[in-house]
Amino acid sequence: MTQTYPKKRLSIIIEAPFLNRLLDLLDGLDVPGYTALPALAGRGKSRSWRRDALSSDAGRMVQVLIVLDQGKVPAVLQEIRKVLDQQIGIVTLSDVEVLRPELF
């Protein structure tokens, strides 16, 4: 069996206009990397939405994924919270296994 290594996966969903602010923050933190993806559709507390039905970036959502060591999580979450306290956003943290730990 192939050996895997435990890491944490941090998922952040925010409105597209705030993406650059979040990415600038991540660039200044001790994270090994991230991937930003468009969210195509969703439903929240107040309504459903579809990306192709929105006329501007306001209301469009993006997801940023980060895989990192457990020891880095508290400091990263503390800084991310400063950005998200004033914005719409969802943050989840989960356990993952990776094949190449040196990348994270």
Image: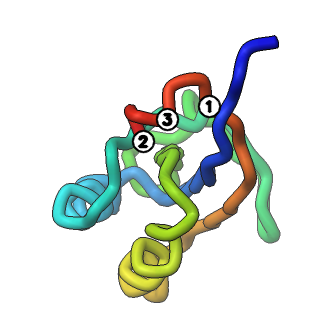
Q: Are the residues tagged 3 and 1 within 8 Å (C-beta)?
A: yes
Which residue carries the number 2 mark? 104
Q: Nearer the viewer, residue 4 or 54?
A: 4
Q: Residues within 10 Å of mark 3 (few under 14, many from 20)?
A: few
Residue 54: x %, y % from top left: 52, 41
Q: Are the residues tagged 2 and 1 within 8 Å (C-beta)?
A: yes
Task: Judge left or right: residue 39 versus residue 85.
Answer: right
Q: CA distance from mark 2 to mark 3?
A: 6 Å
Which residue carries the number 3 mark? 101
The image shows residue 7, relative to residue 93, as above or below, that is above
Residue 56: x %, y % from top left: 38, 45
Q: Residue at x 71, y 42 (%)?
A: 96
**Label 1 sits on what residue type?**
Val
Task: Decide which of tag 2 and tag 1 comes sooner along the chain.
Answer: 1
Q: CA distance from mark 2 to mark 1?
A: 9 Å
Q: Residues within 10 Å of mark 2 (few under 14, many from 20)?
A: some
The answer to which image quadrant residue 88 occupies is bottom right
Which residue carries the number 1 mark? 98
Q: Residue at x 69, y 29 (%)?
A: 4
